[in-house]
Image: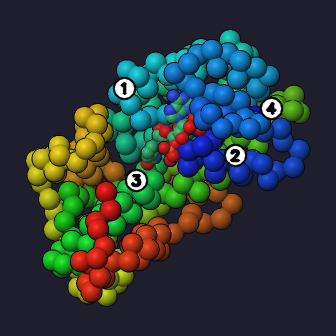
Amino acid sequence: MILVTGVSGQLGSLILKGLSRIDGLEVTPGTRSADIGTARRIDFDDPATLAEGFAGVDVLVFVSAGYAEDDVVIARHGAVADAAEAAGVRHVIYTSLAGSGDLMTIALPHRWTEARLAAGPYDVTILRNGLYTEVPVGLATAGAASAATTGVFAAPFGTGRVSVVAREDLADVAVRVATETHQDLTSGARSRHAGKTYELEGVTAIGGPEIAKILTETLNQEITYQSVSLSDTREALSVSGLEPYQITHTISLFSNLKAGLLEARTTDLTTLLPTAPRPVHPHIAAAVAAGGYHSQSVTTHPTPA
Ligand SMILES: NC(=O)c1ccc[n+]([C@@H]2O[C@H](COP(=O)([O-])OP(=O)(O)OC[C@H]3O[C@@H](n4cnc5c(N)ncnc54)[C@H](OP(=O)(O)O)[C@@H]3O)[C@@H](O)[C@H]2O)c1
């Protein structure tokens, strides 16, 4: 049986949906949600749910639960590794962070989890997910109203670009790896993906000028890109209502971006996907257009948070 954690989340729900379409697979959803239906209750912060929830699981699709301080994330991911061991799970597939993000602060709990899983008795596959397309989508939509008024898209990118990937592509890879692992285990073999670490970096890199170009086309007016300093960004974030750890991670992302570290040179994405990766530019343009931003309507549309 395959169990997927975090199925009320965006990535977990896509993985569950993909696995549910495949004939002959026994797939069980795992969630903290109270409204669980046929799902098992899986809360990494409550190890009792893991002891029960992992019973009879052969393949665990472990979706990271990263929204917290590092010590919290490490404790919850360590509890998953312990419980999978105790329950006799045969193969763990973990959604980690791509190698280009190695120097970002969010890498620390991911790399800790990879090392902890490698010390377990089960086979492991690490899916090192690239940054989601939502990063430039969020910046473009957040900056659209101001760009429509001022003609300037301001963001802390410097001359850096970030390689991004659609969640749907990452889910498709997870579905393939989980399905093939299940097939291999059922036929009495080890998974062909055992011991593998896949770098699932996006094939499209987006920087400030690219977002300004998309805004120019979508808003139908000339928009130029202007880089913002990290100190101005930190000041703005400090009154944004974000948790302190989120500010640390956000500044770290921009710091890496400005340093040119988030543009990937290689990826396993294209080898593992059945078709070309989903395009990124139309996704950003559609999100801006869906916000209804254009110079005439800007006074009636608030900037999204
Ligand atoms: N590559 C990237 O750009 C990027 C960006 C942001 C985050 N991430 C990481 O990728 C993960 C999946 O992304 P996403 O887009 O699906 O995020 P999401 O929509 O926010 O979903 C995260 C899910 O994690 C589960 N979760 C949270 N705390 C948990 C806990 N204590 N125990 C068990 N499950 C818990 C929850 O599912 P249930 O409510 O069903 O339990 C939650 O819905 C995130 O959690 C984060 O670690 C990656």
> Which amino acid, by three-letter code, is at mark 1?
Asp
Q: Residue furthest top?
A: 86
Tell me if mark 2 has few (under 14), some (14-19) or many (20+) residues whose alpha carbon lies within 10 angstroms of its own. many
Earlier residue among tags 2 and 1: 2
> Which amino acid, by three-letter code, is at mark 3?
Ala
Q: Image quarter for residue 245?
A: top left
Earlier residue among tags 1 and 4: 4
- Marks 2/1 in contact by CB < 8 Å: the verdict is no
Identify the residue at image location x=83%, y=38%. 26
Q: Distance from label 3 to label 4 (Cα)?
A: 35 Å
Circle nearer the viewer, 3 or 4: 4
Q: Secondary structure at mark 3?
A: loop
Residue 144 in sight here: no
Q: Distance from label 3 to label 1 (Cα)?
A: 25 Å
Any atom of ligand 1 within 8 Å of the CB at mark 3?
no
Residue that badge 3 annotates: 264
In the image, residue 74 sits, relative to residue 3, either above or below, namely above
- Marks 1/4 in contact by CB < 8 Å: the verdict is no
Q: Position of residue 44 (x, y in %)?
A: 55, 24
Colour style of the rendered protein structure: rainbow
> Which amino acid, by three-letter code, is at mark 4?
Met
Circle nearer the viewer, 3 or 1: 1
The quadrant of the image that shows the C terminus is bottom left
Q: Is residue 282 left or right of residue 160?
A: right
Identify the residue at image location x=31%, y=73%. 301
Earlier residue among tags 2 and 3: 2
Q: Secondary structure at mark 2?
A: helix
Residue that badge 4 annotates: 1
Q: Which mark is residue 70?
A: 1
The quadrant of the image that shows the N terminus is top right
Identify the residue at image location x=39%, y=72%. 291
Residue that badge 2 annotates: 16
